[in-house]
């Protein structure tokens, strides 16, 4: 008898939690679905949107990969790319200090130390997390480095 009663109470309790949980999830879905994605600097290919320079959504900014497409060494390319990231972040209402994550793509892993010399200190006293990889076949557009990032507003 006690076992039956416990089983009934467990089922009742579980269903009540399920209903409360479903209601919370429904409210969260409603509140986030009203946020619109904003795209900046859309690049088109044959008049069809191809990609955006950055996208803002729900307080986050996703900046597309930036490269340096001119003759120069890794330090000049790194400086240029970081300035491009900063420009894109400012256009979207953010800054280098608000960057949470950076991905760095190097055409040659041998440039890692020189890239770091230019990179250090560019994101303030609390630098973002970072992933750095060497690309097989190089970075598009003959850039020695490409970077993208995620920041908040």
Image (cartoon, rainbow, N blue to C red):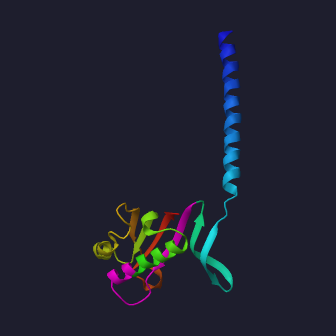
In the rendered view, would you say 71 is above or below 117?
below
Question: Residue 55's x, y, as percent?
Answer: 58, 69
Which quadrant of the view contains residue 105?
bottom left
Q: Name the residue: 37% across, 79% down.
A: 79
Residue 116 forms part of the magenta stretch? no
Q: Which residues are magenta?
A: 59-79
Q: In this image, 77 relative to 56: left or right?
A: left
Q: Quadrant of residue 70?
A: bottom left
Q: Position of residue 58 (x, y in %)?
A: 60, 59
The answer to whether residue 30 is above or below residue 109 is: above
Q: Is residue 77 left or right of residue 148?
A: left
Q: Nearer the viewer, residue 84 or 94?
A: 94
Residue 17 in view: yes
Residue 137: tell me if it is visible: no
Q: Quadrant of the N terminus?
A: top right
Q: Residue at x 33, y 85 (%)?
A: 73
Q: Residue at x 67, y 44 (%)?
A: 25
Of 42 and 59, the residue lying toward us: 59
């Amino acid at each position: 008898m006690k076992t039956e009663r416990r089983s009934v109470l467990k089922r009742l309790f579980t269903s009540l939690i399920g209903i409360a949980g479903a209601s919370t999830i429904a409210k969260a879905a409603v509140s986030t679905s009203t946020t619109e994605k904003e795209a900046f600097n859309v690049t088109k290919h044959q008049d069809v949107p191809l990609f955006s320079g950055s996208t803002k959504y729900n307080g986050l900014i996703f900046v597309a990969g930036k490269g340096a497409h001119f003759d120069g060494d890794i330090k000049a390319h790194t400086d240029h790319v970081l300035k491009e990231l900063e420009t894109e972040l400012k256009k979207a209402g953010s800054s280098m200090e608000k960057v949470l994550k950076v991905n760095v793509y190097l055409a040659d892993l041998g440039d890692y130390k020189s890239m770091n010399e230019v990179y250090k200190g560019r994101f303030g006293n609390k630098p973002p997390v970072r992933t750095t990889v060497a690309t097989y076949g190089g970075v598009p557009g003959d850039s020695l480095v490409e970077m993208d990032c995620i920041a908040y507003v």
